[in-house]
Image (cartoon, helix red, strand yellow):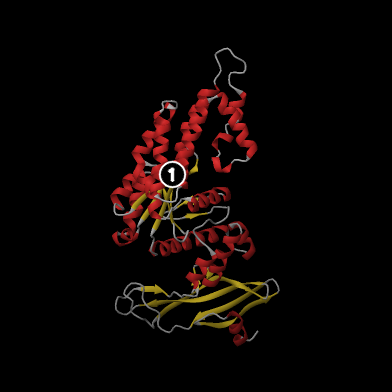
Amino acid sequence: MNRDVMSVRLWLPRIRVLGVVADAPEQLVVRVCSTVSRPRCGVCGTPSGRTHDRRDREVRDLEVSGRPVTLVFSQRRMVCGPCGRRFVEDHRAFEGRVTARLARRLVADAREMTVNAAAKRHQVGWRLVNALVVAWAGVVGDHRRRRRCRVLLVEGTSIRKRHRYVTVLVNGDTGEVLAMVPHRDSAALSGFLAGQGAKWCRRVKVVVSDGSKAYKTAIDRRLGHARHVLDRFHVIRWFAAGLIAVRRDVQRRPEGSTPAFDRDVFGSRFLLMRRPDKLDAAERERLDKLFAAHPRLRAAWDALGELHQLYLAEDREGALAALDRFADIYGSGQIPEFSDTVDTFLAWHNEILEWHRTGRPSNGRIEGTILWSVSEGVGDVADGHMAGGRGRVLWSVSLESAMLLAA
C-alpha cells in the first residue's frame, strides 16, 4: 500500500509513515517515525537535533477497516548539548504502549462495559486497560476538584462491611464525585479539605453530612464559615427510634404468655412508620383500632408525626411550631422512650434547623452514587478516586470527562 494512502488512513498528527511491514486480513503493521525535527530534553527543556541511535517500539492503534493495527515507532534517542544527557524522544500521539486515541477509546468503552470486555474487544491486556482507567480517573478527579463547589455532600460508607470504610465527597450542585477517601474519621475529611486549599474551602457555603461527630470536628475546623446541615434521612431515622422503642414495649406480653408478643402490634410495625399524609382510609382505620387498645402508641405516633413536620413545614417558623407541639406530647410523660431522641436533637439542633435556611439540601445524590457503586462491584480505593477492578469502572471516569480530556 502506498505510504501516502496509509498516512491518510492513519491520520496521526506529526507522524510520518515509513512503510507497511505487514498487510494481512488479520492484522496491519505499519512502520512510522516522528516529524518533530528537534525534540526537547526532559531535564533542561533544550531542543536537540543530535540523534544517538534509534529503537523500534510497538504501539497498538485503533482498528482500520476492522483489522487490528500495530505501529512500529522508530524512536530516536537524542543527545542534549547543554546538559549532555541522553533522552528518548516522546510524542503526544502515543500513550505508553497504545496511541492516545486508542487510550481514550478504551476508557470510554470501560465506562459502558467491564474492563475485561474492553480489553478483549481491542485485543489488549486487562492490566493495560485498568492502568489507563486508574490514570485517567486521577486526572478527571483533579479536574473536578478544581471546580467551584458551593454545596459539599459528605457521607461515610463501607466498601467491605466492618473491614473497609471510606468517606465519599460529592459536589451537591453538579452531582460529581469529588473523591472517595480511605477511612471515615476526622483525619480523612480534614485531609481532603486541607488538600483543596484555603481558596477552595472558602467557596463552600453549605456542608451536608450524617450525624458523625468525627465529620463535625473536621467541618468545624476547616469549614467553620459554612452552614453545616444534617442529612434528613439520618435525622428521621433518629426520630423513628423513639416510636420503635415504644412499640417494642407495648407489644410485650406477660411472661409465660403464648405468643410472647401482641401479634396486632407487631404486625403493624411497618404501618406505624408511615407518615399521616401517606395513609389511605383502610390503613388509617386499622391504626385507629390499634390506638384505641394502646393509647401510648398513638402518643408516640403523633410525636413522630410532629417531628416529621420539621421537614414538611414551609419555613423555619413552621418547623419551630411543630417542635412546640412535639414538646407538649413529650411533656405528658406517656413516651419516656423519646428521651434519647430529645437528647440527640438538643445536641444537633443547629445543624437540623439549618435545613430550611440553606435551600433544603440532601445527601440523596451521594446515597444513590454509593448504592450504584456497591451494586456494580468495587476494585481498589486510590488517593482521591476509585477504579473498578474486574467489574465496571465506577463514577470516577465518564465518557463526557474522557472527551473533555481528549480536547
Element at badge 1? helix
Q: Residue furthest top?
A: 256
Is 376 above or below relative to 325? below
Expressed as whole percent of the image width and height from the top left, the position of residue 21 reads 62, 78
Q: Give 255 or 87, whichever is nearer the viewer.
A: 255
Task: Residue at 49%, 82% (x, y): give it.
Answer: 14
Q: Residue furthest right?
A: 25
Q: Give 89 or 7, whichever is nearer the viewer.
A: 7
Q: Is residue 173 visible?
A: yes
Position of the N terminus, as image quadrant, is: bottom right
Q: Give 329 or 370, whichever is nearer the viewer.
A: 329
| Residue under label 1 | 310
Task: Residue at 45%, 37% (x, y): give it.
Answer: 239
Task: Residue at 37%, 81% (x, y): give it.
Answer: 48
Q: Give 345 or 165, whichever is nearer the viewer.
A: 345
Answer with left or right where residue 8 lies relative to residue 387. right
Q: Is residue 184 visible?
A: no
Expressed as whole percent of the image width and height from the top left, the position of residue 164 reads 46, 42
Answer with left or right where residue 136 lies relative to residue 121. left
Expressed as whole percent of the image width and height from the top left, the position of residue 391 reads 58, 53
Expressed as whole percent of the image width and height from the top left, the position of residue 114 reads 60, 57
Is 112 above or below relative to 355? below
